[in-house]
Image (cartoon, coloured by chain):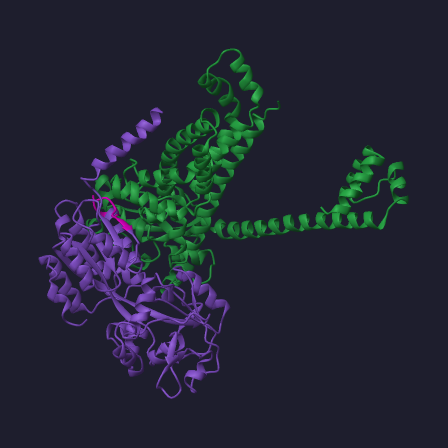
Amino acid sequence: MNKSAEADIAIHTNNDAKMDTTTMANDLNNNEAGNTTASFMNEHKSPRQRKRERANARFHFYGFAAIALALAFLVFFFVDIIGKALPAFDETEVLATIHYSEAASKNYNKAIDKKMRGVVSRAWLRNLPAYMKAHPELMGSSVELWMLADSRVDQYIKQHDGHGLKSKHKHTVDAMLKDGKIRTVFNTTLFTNGDSKLPEYAGILAASVGTVFTLLITMLVAVPIGVMTAIYLEEFADDNRFTRLVEVNINNLAAIPSILYGLLGLAIFISFFGVPRSSALAGGLTLALMTLPVIIITTRAALRAVPESIREAAYGLGASNLQTAWHHVLPLAMPGILTGSIIGLAQAMGETAPLIIVGMMAYIPEAPTTILDATTVLPAQIYTWSTESMRGYGERTAAGILVLLAVLLSLNALAVKLRNRAQQSW
Amino acid sequence: MKRIILATATLLIAAHAVEAREQIKIVGSSTVYPFSSYTAEALGSTTKFKTPVVESTGSGGGMKLFCAGNGMDTPDITNASRRMKAKEFKKCQKNGVKYITEMVVGYDGIAIAQAKSTAALDLTREEMMLAVAAEVPSKDGKSLVANPYHYWNEINAKLPHRKITIYGPPASSGTRDAFEDMILKHITKHMDVYTDLYKADKVKNKQYKKFHKIRQDGVYVPSGENDNLIVQKLAKDTQALGIFGYSYLAENSDSIAAATIEGIAPAPETVQNGSYKLSRSLYFYIKQSHINNVPGMLEYANLFMSEQMIGDEGECADIGLIPLPEEMRANYRSNLKELTRMTPSAFDKKH
């Protein structure tokens, strides 16, 4: 704001403070209300004031344009992702006869008719010998049942370009389609399976379990340490050169590229402590390092928002430092702390860069059972799929993104809800 | 506070838990990764063994982890899209990884491709080199100049007047290594104009021994490890060429077509008989000291080397691997059976 504008405001304030606020409101709404104040203003509009109003309108427009642009990107992104992801929630099944024979228990390909090979998913067929072993009573029988189709058939049925289906299979599929021997059903495989090298059999289960394990560790490590640090710095520590140094460093750490935390994690947890590579423990600890500064900063802000009078009242009744912080300040700051923690964790959940370094970007189809098992996480799974050459992975990548987005959005919504519910006015 | 203690305790337990391992750990080349992880999945779903973990670290990164030692926290197998280097073998020996078995699973072809709608193009390796090298011989052929070529017909009048744009892998990629080896180094090490510079000053001009610097003036566009991205760009930029692995060409044959190299198009037959020059062997290396400690290692190796996986009609061929000739497959299988050890002399002869 330049000097003349300041002077302008000063004059208005001198004339009539109430009138000035009305003008501001009118400027904002950019319309002319037909009340007396406005007509009074019109008579007195100086060129300088018009200029001011124009600047105001311009600013209004810029702001609107910025939001419109951001919204346009968002809409484009969602339309693109959802459009690509929706087909992934359907999967194709084919009706064919399966022969539980001696030959099939040795070579699963022999369980179906020759012309069906390449139409039925190989990943599905591969489980047959084990299944037959578990159900010996089936031996010798032939059953007609719905089986998972090969991803190329799936892509062909969904009419995607470049489905890659060979012409001999195309004839089989066309004929089956006519006989009603092909159907599309809701894709449960996507949610009940881990990664697979055959797109029709690939799912997000293992990655989701891995994400939960990893985030649990991140939470258990980062939240207590972060909150404790913040309470100490805010409520107990003296304001001296050392604490100021710590504060500056924490603020800096929050802005460091996340891949550096991966290198730190590799050096400390894997090389020094010997945590198994690719494990949820290694990933979780690394992400905890990354989330710590965020949690410390938000917690400190939340603690600072608690009015001093509350502390003083507690001290006045003879409460110790610890009692004041623990019984009065912390409960009041809790919503803010929770919000910060949730946002920090949501950020950690979407992170991939540090996890590449600790080896979580790998082919790991089985869900982990302990925190020491090798595991992968959702964003890593999405990335792995996006680099696959087979077409069927494209839509699964988009579906993975959609699932990740849904989880992140609900986490953020939870944070907002907590904040709103516990909003205090002092 | 309790939680912090708990976390520390878990850490300490973790430090001891690495001694026993149920699961095979495989690292290495991103080119071998699809085939390796496919085999891993087949092993996991058809046997009682846990599915091996396959991490794509790049050939060099894989060797580094593999050769780090014999501990149970080091990988059991590393994949590579090139042969183990003598330097890496020495490092392995130094760190106690004494007995290593080398396997070749098949070939990978590098395809130079363009949009399917674009007129066919035939290039020689030399023309390709002249299009991408940072420095090329001047008109009189006596000195090196910064690459002046922007249209193909400037390199060879017989080529079309078409802008040179090449989408290729970035420096970190194995495909880029192979491209530099097979096109740049292969040509420049036989060109006096490069090697004379090296001979004149072996220290300062070391890069000219096998010159492989790629131009950085925007003609060669490094496009990330994601080959799908290059395929998408080619569909939009019909003038451009793209460099990527053969499996992407096979999978996207509806939208892109290969340029022929010295008259030969990439195909399984032309790679096998060696007439298509832009191909390389794919390897994996077995750490013998782990065989008795990690269950399923030999089963994995046998499955990978089986006809079912890498045979002419094998499942890996289905996802883009170019199979070895039959007698070589048999040869490597017998090596696997006897667990033939790599010896330093293996690096003496040229491959």
Residue A89 in sight from this viewpoint = no
Q: Nearer the viewer, residue B259 or A346?
A: A346
The residue sitting at 44% across, 29% down in the picture is: A227
Which quadrant, please, contains the C terminus of chain A? top right
Q: Is residue B52 magenta?
A: yes
Residue A11 in sight from this viewpoint = yes
Q: Nearer the viewer, residue B7 or B156?
A: B7
Residue B31 screen position, x and y as percent:
30, 60
Drawn side of residue B279 relative to residue A257, left or right? left
Residue A16 screen position, x and y as percent:
84, 34
Q: Residue furthest left?
A: B338
Residue A404 screen position, x and y as percent:
46, 43
Whether A182 is drawn above or below B192: the answer is above
Whether A105 is drawn above or below A25: the answer is below
Res A253 → quadrant: top left
> What's drawn in magenta, residue-wise?
B45-54
Whether B4 is drawn above or below B151: the answer is above
The residue sitting at 29% across, 56% down in the picture is: B33
Q: Colour of chain A?
A: green
Q: Nearer the viewer, residue B50 or A349?
A: A349
Drawn side of residue B274 relative to residue A346, left or right? left
Predominant secondary structure in magenta? loop
The residue sitting at 29% across, 50% down in the picture is: A125
Q: Residue furthest front?
A: A241
Q: Colour of chain B?
A: purple
Count of labels in the image = 0
Residue A270 screen position, x and y as percent:
27, 43
Q: Residue furthest top?
A: A317
Res B99 → quadrant: bottom left
The residue sitting at 42% across, 30% down in the picture is: A229
